[in-house]
Amino acid sequence: MGEPSKVLISLGGILDVTGEVVAMWILLAVVTAVCLIIKFTLKEKPGKFQNIIETGVEALDNFFMGLLGEKSRQYFTFLGSLFIFIIFSNYSGLIPGVGLTDYVKAPTASLSVTAGLGVLTFIFLQGAGLKKGVKHYFKRFISPIFIMLPLLVLDELIKPASLALRLFGNVFGEEMVTHQLYEIFPIGVPVVMMVLSLLFCSLQAMVYTMLVSIYLDEATETE
Amino acid sequence: MTNSAIIALAAALAIAVSTIAPAIAQGLTAKSAMESIARQPDAAKDIRSTLIIALALMEALTIYGLLIAFMLISRI
């Protein structure tokens, strides 16, 4: 979908390094660096930097707490990482120059990356469901009546696909609109769309994790 | 009409038609959500989160149309 990414370093056709991969490496480096700095300078009496991070983590915790209740703590690592990854990838498309060159591209504007996230989410949801008990897991597929089985199995497969397509479509669409505006008139005009993107990028990350937590709530609910 | 002209029209129709219906639906959803918030400001938080989910699910339909349009354009 879209245009195939330009290969920067070829590694046998499967593990090719493209602009998205470079962007993800940079993202990984920045997030890891922030985490390490925070880990080693953790204090009883927080400074300015620690305060900012604590506010962010607390907001995330409250967000998932409101959706999942007490069990959100158990899955907070995965959901929080997902949120941080998606929101930073979305915002990386707004950095001037990103997306215009082949070397750095917003990761979530590529279907391969969002499809990867979808597969990850699928595995996570099934794993979380199975962990609650195998019998309970299979009971969910025939829960109202037996005839629902094919529909519910299909539903389980469509969920990650629609998540991936939604994220990709939104971010890619924004990038395309910004790009088109840039082609029309490069000075000033793209800012209009970029300001809107500031809102949409965080909204998409929120929507993705929100839907994942709702599916998780469905998968792990106990009577 | 040539083949590519038909494909271009189909792509335009795919995104246009798939925008109209979700736009109406989203407008109705937002309208009733705002009315409920105005009536019951205490429940604003719950309403907002369900509103976003509902809007996102409707948004997906438009995105599918957009993807089809892109697929068609790449065929020209």
Image (cartoon, rainbow, N blue to C red):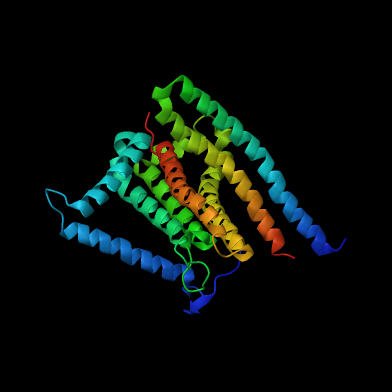
A96 relative to A6, above or below: above
Residue B21 visible to an observer of this rendering:
yes
In the displayed orientation, state which residue is furthest to the left: A44
- Residue sitting at x 55%, y 40%: B57
Task: Point out residue A118 in the picture as x, y percentages from the top left corner.
Answer: 48, 53
Q: Give above or below for A173 relative to B50.
A: below
Query: Looking at this rendering, what residue extends furthest in the front direction?
Result: A188
The quarter in which the N terminus of chain A is drawn is bottom right
- Viewer-proximal residue among A221 and A10: A10
Q: Image quadrant of residue B67?
A: bottom right
Residue B29 percent across, percent down from the top left: 57, 31
Q: Quadrant of residue A131?
A: top left
Looking at the image, which residue is at 31% across and 42% down? A59
Image location (x, y in percent) of residue A45: 12, 48
Is A85 placed above or below A152 here? below
Q: Quadrant of the C terminus of chain A?
A: top left
Instruction: Residue at 59%, 57% (x, y): give it.
Output: A177
